[in-house]
Image (cartoon, helix red, strand yellow):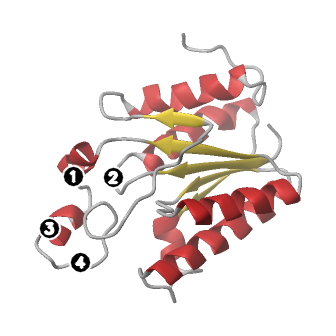
């Protein structure tokens, strides 16, 4: 796949970034030019002016979608790891890509809330449960699961390598990546 966007969406702690980083490490030796767009990093810079109300979350997804599209149009595979809690926002990004003739593939990291809370890598779930964080996705703010993601991935019982391998196997099966021997 010379250009396009793989949009990883799911609850906080689902494994989006870990899987995308592991996938990037698998794709790099195959000469697939990738660019990782991680929500946490983008929130520190490009989207530092945005909060977490619905309007700002929609704008966050829109901006990230525009950057992903720009990166894809110069021949890279954008690996986007953003919670993107609202279906309408993800649909708008998909339509923008389609209008530009750029592939957009949604990977729903469907790891259950209980597993995400157990992982709680940043302690946010615990703080949200104590009322210290308002509008936290999955606790006090909604997450609208994709109805038609191209790939659904549950990282509950899989290693990052297994999960990334499953994504890569899927990309190969779809004909989007060549020169890889599927793990199954």
Can you name the residue that lies furthest to the top here?
A: 184
**Residue 13, image x, y percentages:** 33, 52
- Picture residue at 31% right of the left edge, 34% below the top: 156
> How packed is label 3: few (under 14 Cα within 10 Å), some, or many (20 or more)?
few
- Picture residue at 54% right of the left edge, 10% below the top: 184
Counting residues from the start of the chain, the first of labels 4 and 1 encountered is 1
Mark pair 2, 4: CA separation: 16 Å
Counting residues from the start of the chain, the first of labels 2 and 4 encountered is 2
Mark pair 2, 3: CA separation: 15 Å
Between 35 and 66, which is closer to the camera in this rendering?
Answer: 66
> How packed is label 1: few (under 14 Cα within 10 Å), some, or many (20 or more)?
some
Counting residues from the start of the chain, the first of labels 2 and 1 encountered is 2
Mark pair 4, 1: CA separation: 14 Å
**Residue at numbered disc 1:** 117
Mark pair 1, 3: CA separation: 10 Å
Marks 2,1: beta carbons within 8 A: yes
**Residue at numbered disc 2:** 13
**Residue 151, image x, y percentages:** 57, 35
**Residue 9, image x, y percentages:** 50, 52
Can you name the residue that lies furthest to the left here?
A: 130
Marks 2,3: beta carbons within 8 A: no
Location of the N terminus (image quadrant): top right
**Residue at numbered disc 3:** 129
**Residue at numbered disc 4:** 133
């Amino acid at each position: 796949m010379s250009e396009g966007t793989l949009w990883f969406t799911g609850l906080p702690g689902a494994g989006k970034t870990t899987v995308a980083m592991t996938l990037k490490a698998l794709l790099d030796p195959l000469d697939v030019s990738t660019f990782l767009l991680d929500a946490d990093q983008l929130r520190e810079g490009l989207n530092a002016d945005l909060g977490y109300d619905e309007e700002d979350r929609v704008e966050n997804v829109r901006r990230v979608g525009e950057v992903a599209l720009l990166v894809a149009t110069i021949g890279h595979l954008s690996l986007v790891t953003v919670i993107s809690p609202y279906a309408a926002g993800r649909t708008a990004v998909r339509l923008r890509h389609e209008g530009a003739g750029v592939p957009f593939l949604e990977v729903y990291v469907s790891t259950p809330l209980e597993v995400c809370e157990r992982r709680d890598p940043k302690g946010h779930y615990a703080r949200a449960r104590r009322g210290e964080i308002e509008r936290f996705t999955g606790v006090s703010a909604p997450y609208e699961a994709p109805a038609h993601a191209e790939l659904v991935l549950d990282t509950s019982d899989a290693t990052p390598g297994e999960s990334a391998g499953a994504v890569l196997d899927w990309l190969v099966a779809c004909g989007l990546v060549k020169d890889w021997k599927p793990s199954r």
